[in-house]
Amino acid sequence: MGKMLLEVNNLKTKYVTRFHEDVYAVNGVSLKLEEGKSLGIAGESGCGKSTLALSLMGYYFAPLHYISGDIIVDGKKISEMDPNTVRKSILGNEIAYIPQSAMNALNPTQRIIRFVEDVIRAHDPKKKKKDIYDLARKRFEILGLPEQVLQKHAVELSGGMKQRTVIAISTILSPKVLIADEPTSALDVTSQKKVIRMLRDLMEKGLIHSMIFITHELPLLYNVTDDIMVMYAGQIVERGNAEEMVFDPLHPYAKGLMGSILVPEKGVRDRKLTAIPGTPPNLKHPPDGCLFADRCPYVIPACRGGRPEEKVLPNGRAYRCIMSEERIREVYGNE
Amino acid sequence: MSKTKEEDFCLSGRGVTKVFGAGENRTVAVDHVDFDFREGEFISLVGESGSGKTTLSKMLLGLISLTEGEIQYQGKPRELSTGRKRREYWKGIQAIFQDPFASYNMFNRIDSVLLDCINMRGGRNLSRKQKAEKMAEACGFVNLKYEELTNKYPFELSGGQMQRLMIARIFLLKPKILLADEPTSMIDACSRATILDMLQKLRNEIHMTILFITHDIGLAYYVSDTVYIMEHGKFVEHGSADEVILHPKAPYTRHLIEDVPKIYEEWNLDA
């Protein structure tokens, strides 16, 4: 068992709207991430994936507010720190973040090397320009980016190049945990593969120690991460290892998600795609019972009685549904 | 005999070429492509970004002119010389674009979007009730509830809902050909299945020809009958979906298939 790098216990955060209404975007999330492991978070848009990413970084700036729970990064409890201290001392060298839209993440008037200088100087103000350049050049080379990129402006790079540059910059201090928030959703499949290859290389060479990968593309998660968590309406509804989650989902929502997988392989054309009907619940006024009850095809009256507790199976798999494992298998088997 | 065969093709092109710039900056975006699209066919056009898919689609829509070549619409050369002819052509061909958020006028309510479509298709003199019924029918076609949408503005909808409303518009307009330019690339994987199903429904129920442009060969394989693979402005391979994707001949097609993550087979990242 590797060293525990990230531990989150029952984290709750909320957004406060202009009209002083609370939106519970992350509602009781617990997770553990060991050294050398990668964790995938899947879910549809609006389920709280990106908010979870910001919350994990301790990035509590309005309108996002912290309510309760612990975040422990490599032994440091960052949930009790001031957000500004977190930003200065933790972000970059303990936790790094890759934003969704790399296209807009780079200031078009600056050369790429300036961003690298910014990141390094924030943690080590006295570092010499030449040392920074050497470090950047070496790191870019390892990651398959040509040295010339450093002297270019963001507009001269293609979308895939920009995304890879952003990854290279955000991991330049070898962070303990890398949070990649939909890094490939704006790219075509060819550039996507390059980005994925780069993330794998970073992990293999030990330049990052662990990774959280957020996306709605399940085939990608299956290939990239060790474990998958499925998120719905601010809660983790199911977690387990990638193999089990894709081929044997337990929670009805996870099953619905797996039904939307499209791959260019034999037999896919004969399968009927299952889309989940309806939209996620309004988190300003969440329903009393199971949050998925309104969209669930297997709903029974007891579902609306109260929030289902997380059931943990002996092999570490966990899901949040009132049905027992045997009952679920029986229901799915009858289809 | 040969005449009836030609009439089957609702859209065909010979040597269609588009060149941007001149001299040093000359770029051939689409390079002498030939195609024949049959009526009621579901065609996919697959290629990387920059392969000329969107340029070709703009030429098909008549938004930009051809540098060389000819496009035939229903067996006759396409004419776009006057506004009247263009309008006539656009009755037959309509499009859905990549970004549903940019496809609506943000100051107009959703009703007005659908009402415009009804008015354009000869429904101008219908009573208010009949118009509402038509709008409800169109919304029902894409699994939206008209009662929930009426009097809303586009920004109040989610991306998936907006894209579905775009399809409801197409349902009211009933064009012969629908050109869908990456309609699912800005939508998450769960709503994507719904959009693809609706496109297939349009084809099956209204017998529309659908031209689906995408970079994800997995989507193309799931929905289409015929697949065209485009590389650097040329078609490198075309044929039925099973033929092209399960037994690819061109190296570029194999390369595209390798780029998509797999679940049943091993996905080789280094290939």
Image: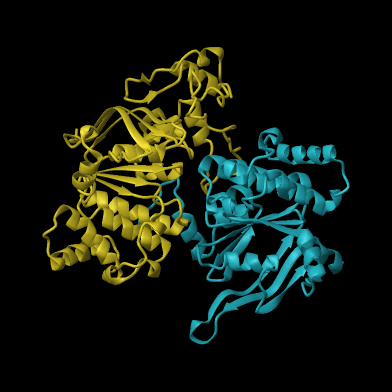
Q: Is residue B196 visible?
A: no
Question: Which residue occupies 59% across, 38% down?
Answer: A273
Q: Is residue B102 left or right of residue A51?
A: right
Q: Position of residue B156 (x, y in %)?
A: 58, 41
From the image, which quarter does the N terminus of chain B lie in? bottom right
Q: Nearer the viewer, residue A183 or A266?
A: A183
Q: Position of residue B108 (x, y in %)?
A: 67, 49
| Colouring rule applied to residues | by chain
Residue A319 falls in image quadrant: top left
From the image, which quarter does the C terminus of chain B lie in? bottom left
Q: Position of residue B258 (x, y in %)?
A: 45, 55
Question: Which residue occupies 31% across, 51% down?
Answer: A199
Question: Which residue occupies 47% across, 38% down?
Answer: A46
Chain A shade in the render: yellow
* Chain in cyan on the image: B
Q: Please, is residue B181 above or below residue B14 in the view?
A: above
Q: Position of residue A51 (x, y in %)?
A: 38, 38
Q: Is residue A97 visible?
A: yes
Residue A236 falls in image quadrant: top left
Q: Is residue A277 left or right of residue B76?
A: left
Q: Nearer the viewer, residue A299 or B21?
A: B21
Q: Is residue B55 left or right of residue B111?
A: left
